[in-house]
Image (spheres, rainbow, N blue to C red):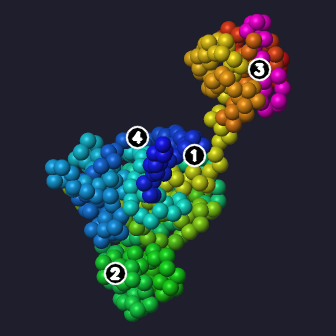
Amino acid sequence: MCPAPKVSAVRGFRDVLPDESHVWRRVEQCAEEIFTDYGFAPVSLPVLERVDLFARSLGDTSDVVEKEMFAFEDRDGTTVALRPEATASTVRAYLEGGPGAQAGRARYWYAGPMFRRERPQRGRYRQFQQIGAEIFGEAGPMADAELVLMLADYLAAIGVRDTRLLLGTVGDGRCRPAYRDVLRAYAAARREALCANCRQRLERNPLRLLDCKEEACRAEMAGAPLLSDHLCGECAEHFVAVRRLLDGEGVAYEFTPRLVRGLDYYSRTAFEVLASGLGAQNAVGGGGRYDGLVEALGGPSVPALGFALGVDRLAMVLEAPEGVSSEGTAVLPLNEAAAGPALSLATRLRRGGHRVLLEPPGRSVKAMLRAADRQGARLAVLLGDDELAGGTLTIRDLRQRRDHPGVLPVDVTATRFAEWMRAQNEGGA
């Protein structure tokens, strides 16, 4: 009989297996600790939203809305989409269930999957995990500086090394339209040298011309006018104040006058984090201010700002922890008679707060020790005929490759086991 054909994952979607899951968990736990210290509260957002939410927030002409959303018509005729990003969803939640109707202040953070139908490649998937933070109701430059400072603290806390923080400003609704006209005129004179995508951007969203990755387009736009030279007085003062605050805290950043964000809702401060070792797709996160978005989505005029980080890419530049736990314990029943006592021992230790791997009986001692070592256990507790007859355990230190026979009884309590482990760590008997 022929075996049934295997069912593979959908293109662009992937499994996150234990080795990488441990990194993801560390990244998210650290986010909760750091963000909570900065006064952010967690929110859990739905994966499915109305398409209109993203069309109004990201812009009808954005690549996300035009090409990348997983959108479909629900049975009731509502057009919905798997969320491509979470800022718009967080604004909706702020307005529907939070203090948004009264233009109140709020700080939220989230973690979860996003979906975009992009071309899959290393570090870019059609389902990807993000961590983000959003601030509502704070207009001053101190909020911008505080958000960037929190991001820097977080990246340092999880151990991301060799990153670059790019900082710029994209102006606002008063100064950006005039700059857009200047930029369009500059690019129109070079239209024939631009790629097909940039020719479309020239008419619909000329700011995106500065973000093209084609070398020919980058060369043509290298001499383009700078937005920083066309800022209104308020935007210029705001950005100077942000930089002064960050300089005062010793935050390292690179002023990047041509920095643009890929989504239409950004205003004033914008920033991006790049990491080495990722190739062309080296951005691990970014964000900025989006003062008009709450109003665009039906709320009052509320200043807002935030950022999002890609967990998939962060995991690629972090070292995976060595196994499940460096202090884990493996309980190894060497035969069927030892299965019951081994289960009882593992249960006592687990209920006492120990991390325990329980191997099934029936394999060789060598195979079980190899499995315990692979799972990151420090200690292996052997239970066989000799141990059951003598009423004591044989404990093998997998780091030092040393046995401790008969030091603890088979019915040892979790507390006594912890005391013995502590004595070993301190160099005692």
Residue at image point 69% right, 26% down: 363
Mark 3 and mark 4 lie on one chain; the one further toward the N terminus is: 4
Observer-side mark, 3 or 4, equals 3
Mark 1 or mark 3: which comes first in sequence? 1
Residue 49 on image: x %, y %: 27, 51
Q: CA distance from mark 1 to mark 4?
A: 23 Å
Magenta range: 386-403
Q: Earlier in the sequence, mark 1 or mark 4?
A: 1
| Viewer-side residue, 308 vs 385 | 385
Task: Say whether residue 129 is visible.
Answer: no
Q: Amino acid at mark 3?
A: Ile
CA separation in Å, label 2 and label 4: 39 Å
Q: Image height check: is 49 above or below 63? A: above
The residue that mark 2 highlights is 200
* Residue at numbered disc 4: 42
The answer to the question of whether label 1 and label 3 lie on touching residues, with beta carbons closer than 8 A, is no
Where does the C terminus fall, quadrant-wise?
Answer: top right
Q: Is residue 180 above or below residue 361?
A: below
* Residue 397 part of the magenta segment: yes
Local crowd size for mark 3, using a 10 Å CA cut-off: few (<14), some (14–19), many (≥20): many
Q: Secondary structure at mark 2?
A: helix
Q: Which residue is mark 1?
A: 20
In percent of the image, x 44 and y 71: which residue is there? 260
Q: Secondary structure at mark 3?
A: strand
Q: Image check: 106 left or right of 281?
A: left
State the CA–CA distance, disc 1 to disc 3: 30 Å
Q: Amino acid at mark 4?
A: Pro
Query: Mark 3 = which residue?
Result: 395
- Dot 4, how many residues are within 10 Å of its Cα: few (below 14), some (14-19), or many (20+)? some
Foreground residue among 342 and 349:
342
Q: CA distance from mark 3 to mark 4?
A: 43 Å
